[in-house]
Image: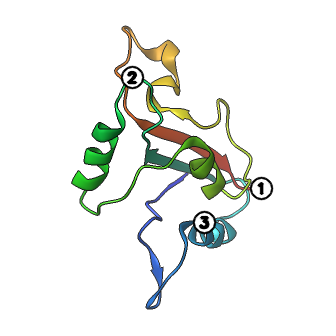
Amino acid sequence: MSAADLTYLTVGRKRLPTTELVRRYHEKLPSGSVHLVSHVTADDPIVDGGTAARMSQAMATPTYARDHDTFEALLGGAPLVEPGVVFAQEWNPDQHNSEPEHSCVYVAIARID
């Protein structure tokens, strides 16, 4: 399994678009790997966009919130493990004993074939 924050990586001194960084990263992973990815979003209907923006800016390396389609596009069409791109609280809801709190974070696991 691989988990990495690719948003801020650079190649040499050149800063590449995040989608290009993810593509290059996936090319280096052996077939059969999985890539766990998460990202702040303002899409959660329960958590207001301002909260997501404050969370994004409070991180050690500030980022910005991405919507569902933009986040999914970062994975470059890699096959996703079910349930695909979902809010963190929806990833495996059967394992919770109570209603999970809303997170305003998307998660996904991409398979590298």
Labels 1 and 2: the sequence-earlier one: 2
Image: 108 above or below 29? above
Depth order, front residue of 104/88: 104
Report whether 85 appears left or right of 51: right
Question: Residue 91: percent from the left, percent from the top?
Answer: 52, 28
Helix, strand or loop at label 1? It is loop
Q: Distance between the residues labelled 3 and 1?
A: 18 Å
Question: Residue 33: percent from the left, percent from the top?
Answer: 65, 54
- Which is closer to the viewer, label 3 or label 1? 3
Image: 3 above or below 41? below
Q: Distance between the residues labelled 1 and 2?
A: 36 Å
Depth order, front residue of 28/73: 73
Question: Residue 90: percent from the left, percent from the top?
Answer: 51, 24
| Residue carrying label 2 | 46
Q: Residue 19 carries which label?
A: 3
Tell me what residue is drawn at x 45 percent, y 65 percent.
7
Q: How far apart are marks 3 and 2 (CA)?
A: 28 Å
Q: What residue type is labelled 3?
A: Thr
Q: What residue type is labelled 1?
A: Asp
Decide: few, some or many residues near mark 3? Use Cα within 10 Å; few <14, some 14-19, many ≥20: some
Helix, strand or loop at label 2? It is loop
